[in-house]
Amino acid sequence: AQTVTQSQPEMSVQEAETVTLSCTYDTSENNYYLFWYKQPPSRQMILVIRQEAYKQQNATENRFSVNFQKAAKSFSLKISDSQLGDTAMYFCAFMSAYSGAGSYQLTFGKGTKLSVIP
Amino acid sequence: ETGVTQTPRHLVMGMTNKKSLKCEQHLGHNAMYWYKQSAKKPLELMFVYNFKEQTENNSVPSRFSPECPNSSHLFLHLHTLQPEDSALYLCASSQGFQETQYFGPGTRLLVL
């Protein structure tokens, strides 16, 4: 079974600074998808970024980028120019790319609570 | 309404009550999911439906009963719950398996 570990329960960053959230995962599979989701306080969980394991290029979405290290099974999220609206819980998640039972299952980490300080 | 909606947003119920949670997706997706989010624990997948057919029941107690009348609607019927069932219940949908899942705002459930 796959596991996802987020080793930083809480982090804080000054507004306009850069912060990196860590995520490691354990799998024996070669093809899979990785995700970062953001859940603001009392608000909807939304997708931040998605990475296909077969792609060597790191995914980016505006101020959000990932550092995907497949061999190390590491998938960190970098937030540049942090804004107050970035304050949220951030969840790293894994999904197998193989068809069959459980292929749709998202395995989540426990999350990192990020606070952006004015 | 756009995206994935859930009602009610908050629910308080006694252990002998029967209630239902509703989820509706406006994205034209074919797969729908129920998740449970408890404090200090990772999200737990409860049920999966694909084209209205249940494809997964992750060892969920029978006091939780899902219903999917069509690809746009998903219900979670609750009866004789326990206080430890208090949590945020999230609904999600995706175009198909291995596609990105989009989440609703959740129903915050408190069982007294």
Image: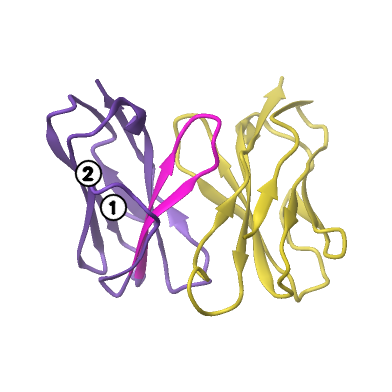
Q: Which residues are magenta?
A: B31-49
- Compare residues A67 and A29 and report the one nearer the observer: A29
- The image shows residue B88 at horizontal and vertical percentages of 39, 36
- Rendered residue at 23%/60% (across/down): B73
Q: Is residue B48 magenta?
A: yes
Q: Which residue is mark 1?
A: B1
* Chain letter of disc 2 in the image: B
Q: Which residue is mark 2?
A: B63
Helix, strand or loop for the magenta stretch, by majority? strand
CB under 8 Å between discs 2 and 1: no
Farthest residue, direction bottom: A99
User: Left or right: A49 with respect to B107?
Assistant: right
User: Can you say whether A32 is above or below A44 in the image?
Assistant: below
* Chain letter of disc 1 in the image: B
How many residues crowd mark 2 within 10 Å: few (<14), some (14–19), many (20+)? some
- The image shows residue B92 at horizontal and vertical percentages of 40, 55
Give the colour of chain B.
purple
Give the colour of chain A.
yellow
